[in-house]
Amino acid sequence: MSTRVLVINSGSSSIKYQLLDVETHEALATGLVERIGQPTGKLKHTGPAGTTTLEQPVPDHEAGMAMVLQLFEEHGPRLVESELTAVGHRIVQGGSVFAGPAVIDDAVLQQIDDLSSLAPLHNPANVAGVRAARHAFPSTPHVAVFDTAFHSTLEPAAYEYAIDREVARRYAIRRYGAHGTSHLYVSRQAAAFLGKDPSEVNVIVLHLGNGASATAVRGGRSVETSMGLTPLEGLVMGTRSGDLDPAVLFHLARVAGMSIDELDDLLNRRSGMLGLSGHTDMRDVHAAVEAGDENARTALDVYYHRIKGYVGSYYAHLGRVDAIVFTAGIGENDDLVRAGALAGLERLGIEVDPERNAGRITEEKVISPDGAEVTVLVIPTNEELEIARQAVETISAG
Ligand code: AMP
């Protein structure tokens, strides 16, 4: 059986895709359709013949997917449907319904759509991507891999908010977490790196990208995670505030007359590093600090302070920590953040070796000194590979 999987990550105005061979881990093609529904769309496809870019309107996801097929047809590799094991879809919110991947049929697609109230920006876009892909590949199985599924092992003590139980039940209010596919992949890779089975190790994963989250993984199971009902809770992010006293919202509604939509926009799109420093990208924040910008300096301090608090909290929850792992855009590339976030934790057995930590790190690497009680690692995440793997496993099990 071929183990080729087309992985699709569909956003409200974009489709990101990768054709992967699960056996060899090779990405045979990658691509991105952007600005769907806007006057000018953009397509980029990288395959065996190099990279092709196109600018043309992409009215909707159906049209986008048709153009992707065309790109494969013209620039390779040729997508013979019979050689595709599955199409794997990244789905953001699986609620309490999906604790693992699911083969997509009409009923599953309806359930994903029904969960849209919990992820109004993401699930409808995911559904649009699935619909278009099912039309494009009608005889290939489609598998949904949920960003929340890895956190379905959280105990009530970790996932319940201390609010009226009846209100919480009626509106499905609880912590679901996110970035689960990345946390699962990275925590398993960490165990393998340490030469152990995932069941034998306790790991804290710090997924620091434009979105950021921390997860405590005990014996291969997620037991605590920083994102909540939505990806807004937890660490400071590129444009999201992370943790905040909810009363800030009532206060702003009362004293500033801000609407629900304005508050949503403030916390999701105009806060975090952008709100504190004026910059979303961590490279720009560092450049501003270098130039003497006090706001940028404070923004970084807030960023480190929040991560350190989570590491301490997760240490307490796990009792014993074998490894702390940095991953994603900032976690893999930013040595200043890795050193800054863990500074001063020597008493917990956590140290970063300046030489090992220096620069961008593109492969799995230890950055703690020899003999350190806690191994600090950088492990590049690969959500696409994990989605492809799970898709193949799900099909094989079926
Ligand atoms: P992600 O969401 O995982 O793709 O991460 C994107 C973020 O990674 C960007 O917004 C940057 O803040 C950060 N990033 C990417 N490359 C670097 C780099 N070389 N140094 C520092 N930060 C980086």
Image (tube, helix red, strand yellow):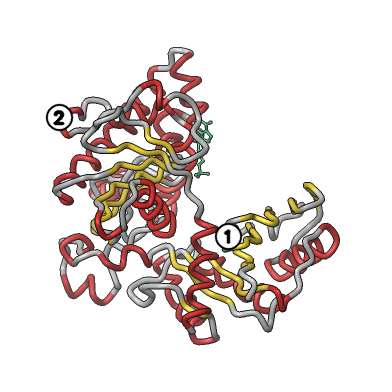
Q: Residue at x 78, y 57 (%)?
A: 57
Q: Nearer the viewer, residue 229 or 107?
A: 107
At label 2, counting other C-alpha atoms closer than 10 Å, the crowd grade (few under 14, some 14-19, many 20 or more) is few
Q: Residue at x 28, y 45 (%)?
A: 243
User: Can residue 358 be spotted in the picture?
Assistant: yes
Q: Give the percent coordinates (x, y) of residue 83.
A: 70, 74
Of tags 1 and 2, the one toward the viewer is 2
Q: Residue at x 38, y 75 (%)?
A: 98
Residue farthest toward the right in the current orientation of the protein: 74
Q: Give the percent coordinates (x, y) of residue 239.
A: 45, 41
The quadrant the N terminus occupies is bottom right
Residue 63 lies in what quarter of the image? bottom right
Residue farthest toward the top in the current orientation of the protein: 292
**In this image, 112 relative to 171: left or right?**
right
User: Can residue 33 be spotted in the picture?
Assistant: no
At label 1, counting other C-alpha atoms closer than 10 Å, the crowd grade (few under 14, some 14-19, many 20 or more) is many
Residue 127 lies in what quarter of the image? bottom right
Q: Secondary structure at mark 2?
A: helix
Q: Is mark 2 within 8 Å of ligand 1?
A: no
Q: Residue at x 50, y 82 (%)?
A: 110
Q: Is mark 1 within 8 Å of ligand 1?
A: no
**In this image, 339 relative to 362: left or right?**
left
* Residue at which label 1 appears: 11
Q: Secondary structure at mark 1?
A: loop
What kind of residue is marked 2? Arg
* Residue at which label 2 appears: 347
The image shows a total of numbered marks equal to 2
Residue 375 lies in what quarter of the image? top left
What kind of residue is marked 1? Gly
Q: Nearer the viewer, residue 81 or 172?
A: 81
